Image (cartoon, rainbow, N blue to C red):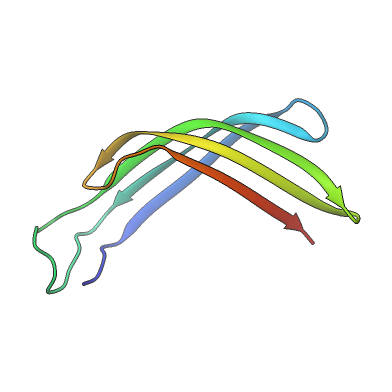
Amino acid sequence: YQTGQEFHVDYMINQFLSDTFAMGLQGFYYKQTTADSGTAVIVDDFKGEAAGIGPAAMWVTQVKDVDLYITGKWLYEFHAENRLKGNHFFLNVTLDF
């Protein structure tokens, strides 16, 4: 079994409300551009597609003179075709070194 080729884009628009805190909008779009292949494929041309959007917040601080970014986002998936559908919550911690 081999998954078909996929296209995925994420976007984020933030407004810093202070030097260390930002809020904004984040979203994604996913589209499978070619069909799955292999012996386990039951349905021909079973291509997935999905899109979601939601709020995001980011806090920036320093740990021993190194920037630490904490980002939380909730994505409402408003479109899903041939995929599981549901809302997503992500918490990212990034250390800039």
Identity of the residue furthest to the top in this view: 17
Residue at 12%, 74% in the rendered image: 39
Going by the image, does 89 lie left or right of 47? right
Residue 41, compared with residue 92, is above or below; it is below
Task: Please state the horizontal and vertical placement of residue 45, each as a whole percent of the image.
Answer: 13, 56
Question: Where is residue 53 shown, x and y percent of the image?
Answer: 45, 32
Q: Position of residue 74 (x, y in %)?
A: 51, 35
Residue at 71%, 31% in the rendered image: 22
Residue at 32% x, 42% y is 50
Count every numbered label the image shows and give the total: 0
Q: Look at 45% across and 47% down and name the residue there.
A: 9
The residue closer to the viewer here, 71 or 38, is 71
Q: Quadrant of the C terminus?
A: bottom right
Relative to 23, is 28 on the left or the right?
Answer: left
Looking at the rendered image, the quarter that the N terminus falls into is: bottom left
- The extreme right residue here reads 65
Give the percent coordinates (x, y) of residue 52.
40, 36
| Closer to us: 9 or 88 | 88
User: In the rendered view, would you say 24 is above or below 94?
Assistant: above
In this rendering, position of residue 10 left or right of residue 34: right
Picture quadrant of residue 35: bottom left
